[in-house]
Amino acid sequence: MIFENLEFRILQEGDFNAVWNLILAEYITREPCCVALDLDEEKISTVYLNLAKNSISHQASLGAFDKQTKELIGINLTLLAKKRDSIPDIDLSQLPKEMQQYGMMLTTLSGEENLVAPEKFMGTKNYMQSTMLCSKTNHGNKGLGTELYKRSEEIALKEGCEKRFTFSVSAFTSKICDKMGYESLKDVIYKDYIDPITGDKIFENVPSPHTKCSLMSKNL
Ligand SMILES: CC(C)(COP(=O)(O)OP(=O)(O)OC[C@H]1O[C@@H](n2cnc3c(N)ncnc32)[C@H](O)[C@@H]1OP(=O)(O)O)[C@@H](O)C(=O)NCCC(=O)NCCS
């Protein structure tokens, strides 16, 4: 796929509103776990607002813009662990119930309480984490997600990162990671996962074809 109509560049503070609007319109409405938990703007703001701002501030998050209209078409938000000291831990107990439930599922994968910095698990402080990957529906399934991941890898290498990782909640992200040589370190199978708060299978109704959340990692 050739992206001659798109401009790829590092996102800046001034892009935040466009990024947030994309997250509201295209991310939380389609990201499989957000859909299953019926997350809305109020709930996701408790975590994603800072996550998006911090990711942009690390100067390693990519946006794909339509060259003519300047519209934001896709994002791969990333954190560089070496710049992460300023980010406080997330206290799950202070979050809305659904965000706690989501966070607990992710900690099941990393085995660490600290969602923000799973360093013990990664074995290094020098990694890039993809926090939010999204392409607009009408540009989806055309290779944009893959292209954003490839370009982020160039940034990670330039930054001297030893590893990349992501919590892949989507079958499409997992396909991208598989193609790019990531290893799946641990999976949560949605239909089997039992939420520790309610005892319910809260991800049973994740939309098809998504079946699992995987901790995907790659040595660079
Ligand atoms: C995940 C997402 C960013 C993928 O973006 P994309 O631009 O479609 O990515 P690509 O075109 O590179 O597709 C990646 C793979 O998924 C497949 N895919 C993407 N959309 C698909 C669809 N609707 N149906 C079937 N397969 C699809 C592609 O065919 C490709 O597979 P391949 O590697 O075998 O060719 C996009 O679906 C999205 O924004 N989803 C909502 C937010 C979300 O869930 N983010 C991921 C969180 S981990």
Image (cartoon, rainbow, N blue to C red):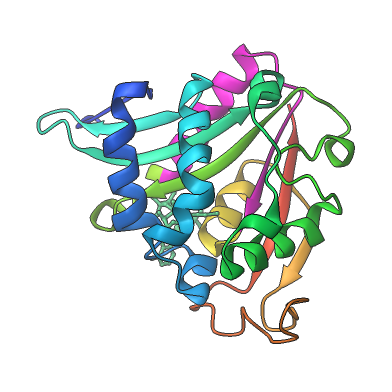
Of all residues, the one furthest to the left in this rendering is 68
Q: Is residue 71 left or right of residue 45?
A: left
Count every numbered label the image shows and give the total: 0
Q: Is the C terminus in the top left, top right, bottom left or bottom right quadrant? A: top right
Residue at image location 29% in from the left, 58% down from the top: 137
Q: Is residue 87 left or right of residue 154?
A: right
Residue at image location 29% in from the left, 52% down from the top: 136
Asked whether residue 1 is in view, the answer is no
Residue 22, percent from left and from top: 31, 47
Asked whether residue 135 is in view, the answer is yes
Q: Nearer the viewer, residue 94 or 49?
A: 94
Q: In terms of image quadrants, where is residue 28?
A: bottom left
Q: Is residue 196 left or right of residue 76?
A: right
Residue 82, percent from left and from top: 71, 19
Residue 94, percent from left and from top: 64, 56
Residue at image location 89% in from the left, 32% down from the top: 123
Q: Quadrant of ligand 1?
A: bottom left
Compared with 111, 120 (above or below) is above
Compared with 126, 89 (above or below) is below
Residue 155 on the magenta span: yes
Q: Nearer the viewer, residue 45 or 29?
A: 45
- State which region is magenta: 145-168
Residue 92, percent from left and from top: 69, 56
Compared with 132, 153 (above or below) is above
Q: In terms of image quadrants, where is residue 170?
A: bottom right
Of all residues, the one furthest to the front in this rendering is 94
Q: Is the N terminus in the top left, top right, bottom left or bottom right quadrant? A: top left
Residue 198 on the magenta span: no
